[in-house]
Amino acid sequence: MRSMPLLVLALACGGEPAPAAPSPAEETPEAPATRDGASPPPESWVAPRVEESIARMESSEAGRLVAQSIEAHGGLSAWLSKGTIAFDFDYHPITQPERRMRSYQQVDLWSARARHEERGVTVETPTGGPTVAEGAVNAPLATFGWDGHEAWIAPEASAFPSTARFWSLTPYFFVGMPFVAADPGTRYERLPDAELDGVTYQLVKLTYDAGTGDAPDDYYVLYLHPETHRLAALRYVVSYPGFFTPGNHSPEKIMRYTEPSTVDGLTFATRLDTYAWSDEGQGDKVTNVVVGDLTLGETWPDTLFARPSEAEEAELVPRAE
């Protein structure tokens, strides 16, 4: 595990669930709002959440830039109104093709619950010959997720190249940028503008309140286009305690957001390729990442995210073998 290129996030799998929706007491007594499983939420849930998030972001220049970027990608209200997102995430480390991870994932935006079905991929062996990783392409292999309280995996922890608790919400967080930058617990810091590919971008650093998720020491630096306000790239570090001791983290990497696609009025990057980063700038590409099959606003039963009876609990820090 330690040797593979890593993706991580402050609200990664095992992080705190999204704030609860308004309770029935906050609704009109005659018609309390309810939600059927994981689905688009009642309209009365969305406005208060948007109001709180916008007020928090508008309190600083850095936050205002993030809010502006979210609006340029389709808007926070539209994002929260969808309620659910599903997509295929194909993470392909260039120097370790055997560590490739591809899964189809379904995420409930309002409770941070997630479910993955691993999809088989064709990989190259170290000798250059092709081989198929356990099963045909698109065949479910491992199944894992986060049920709002614990992470789980079936048939066993070794069935997936990364830890299930770490990976359950990691891809969602990157795909969901900049929308997820509005989440409670996020802090915003304006950094000096910086050039990338000949464009001078506005930079905002995201950090997190103590106790936010499994890895509150993660940080992200957003590169926001000065005219379109779209997210072009983000730098980040890995501090997940399953991989690093307290106070330590990975070197910075930079993820490039390219090949945008608009789905139901919201714009997402479909390539999230990652490169090494240093004081000298961008280095070699380390990971190809492709996002596909993205849908919004589907309805799923709560049982979709429940831990199956045959699944193992996926711990924060994996047990030593």
Image: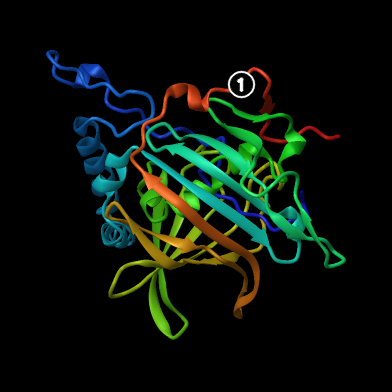
- Which scheme is used to colour this image of the protein? rainbow
Rendering quarter of residue 286: bottom right
Nearer the observer, 132 or 248? 132
Label 1 crowd (10 A; few <14 / some 14-19 / many >=20): some
Q: Is residue 17 above or below residue 34?
A: below
Nearer the observer, 298 or 178? 298
Q: Position of residue 169 (x, y in %)?
A: 53, 42
Nearer the observer, 17 or 221? 17
Total number of numbered labels?
1
Q: Work out which residue is located at the far bottom of the displayed protein and give it.
A: 198
Q: Is residue 277 left or right of residue 203?
A: right
Q: Position of residue 223 (x, y in %)?
A: 42, 69
Q: Position of residue 164 (x, y in %)?
A: 65, 37
Q: Is residue 84 above or below residue 247?
A: above
Q: Is residue 271 above or below residue 36?
A: below
Q: Work out which residue is located at the far top of the displayed protein and give it.
A: 30
Q: Is residue 147 left or right of residue 288?
A: left
Q: Is residue 156 left or right of residue 216?
A: right
Which element type, helix, strand or loop, lies under badge 1? Answer: loop
**Residue located at (46% from left, 61% from top):** 270
Q: Position of residue 159 (x, y in %)?
A: 74, 38
Amino acid type assigned to the residue bearing label 1 in the image? Pro
- Name the residue beneath numbered marker 1: 308
**Residue located at (52% from left, 38% from top):** 213
Task: Point out the image quarter for the C terminus.
Answer: top right
Q: Is residue 197 above or below residue 155?
A: below
Rendering quarter of residue 245: top right
